[in-house]
Image (cartoon, rainbow, N blue to C red):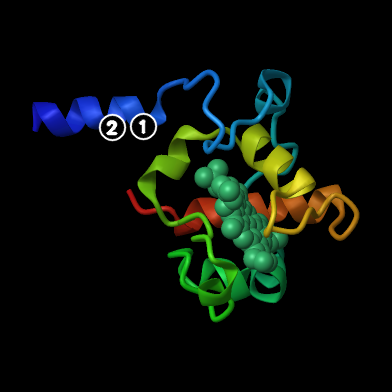
């Protein structure tokens, strides 16, 4: 168990110079979600997710959507409990800028829709 714990710390800790981990700039990470979690926000977020994100990330966020197999890279597992380590600001920045093959949503979704989908993502991550 101690081994597992230290392995987890290695995975989630800062990794300067690493190219394969996607890390948001600190200033972006500090951005606060202006939209409180509510039934209407979750419903709006779920709509966006079902339309734009499910194909890759999968219905439950397991990264197993119908398009995932063709990508040659695993879409992030949004259901992973480690997602809780990321701030809403980090997720917002990632959804805004995208990272191949994930599209950027800065122009495709309004800021409100991006924050709503983040509120919804929070309900996918397992505890
Ligand atoms: C074409 C497939 C595709 C679509 C559509 C897509 N994604 Fe992604 N997404 C990916 C891939 C692949 C990654 C992993 C990128 C990497 O780390 O290199 C990713 C990563 C992410 C991450 C980062 C997770 C982390 O570990 O920090 C978030 C958040 C995310 N996606 C949210 C979304 C949301 C929200 C939508 C819909 C608005 C969406 N994605 C649509 C493929 C996709």
Q: Is residue 5 above or below residue 92?
A: above
User: Residue at the bottom extreme?
Assistant: 66
Considering depth in this image, is 113 or 34 the residue closer to the camera? Answer: 113
The spot of residue 106 in percent (x, y) is 85, 49
Q: Relative to residue 59, is residue 112 drawn left or right?
A: right
**Count of marks overlaid on the render:** 2
The residue labelled by disc 1 is 11
The residue labelled by disc 2 is 8
Q: Relative to residue 81, is residue 112 drawn left or right?
A: right
Which residue appears at 66% of the width and 19% of the height?
26
Considering depth in this image, is 104 or 43 the residue closer to the camera? Answer: 104
Considering depth in this image, is 115 or 103 the residue closer to the camera? Answer: 103
Quadrant for ligand 1?
Answer: bottom right
User: Residue at the left extreme?
Assistant: 1
Res. 42 in view = no
Q: Is residue 27 above or below residue 5?
A: above
Q: Residues within 10 Å of mark 1 (few under 14, many from 20)?
A: few
Res. 101 in view = yes
Q: Which numbered marker is on residue 63?
A: none
Check whether the beta carbons of the residues at disc 2 and disc 1 lie within 8 A of each other: yes
Determine whether the residue tagged by mark 1 lies in a helix, strand or loop: helix
The spot of residue 119 in percent (x, y) is 61, 51
Q: Is mark 1 within 8 Å of ligand 1?
A: no
The spot of residue 45 in percent (x, y) is 68, 62
Q: Is residue 11 above or below residue 63?
A: above
């Amino acid at each position: 168990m101690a081994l597992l714990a230290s392995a987890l710390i290695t995975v989630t800790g800062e990794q300067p110079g690493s190219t394969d981990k996607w890390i948001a700039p600190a200033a972006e990470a500090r951005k606060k979600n202006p939209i409180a979690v509510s039934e209407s926000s979750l419903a709006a977020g779920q709509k966006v997710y079902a339309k734009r994100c499910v194909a890759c990330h999968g219905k439950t966020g397991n990264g197993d959507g119908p398009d995932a197999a063709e990508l040659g890279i695993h879409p992030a597992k949004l259901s992973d409990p480690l997602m809780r380590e990321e701030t809403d600001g980090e997720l917002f920045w990632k959804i805004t800028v995208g990272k191949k093959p994930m599209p950027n949503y800065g122009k495709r979704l309004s800021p409100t829709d991006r924050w709503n989908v983040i509120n919804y993502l929070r309900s996918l991550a397992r505890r």
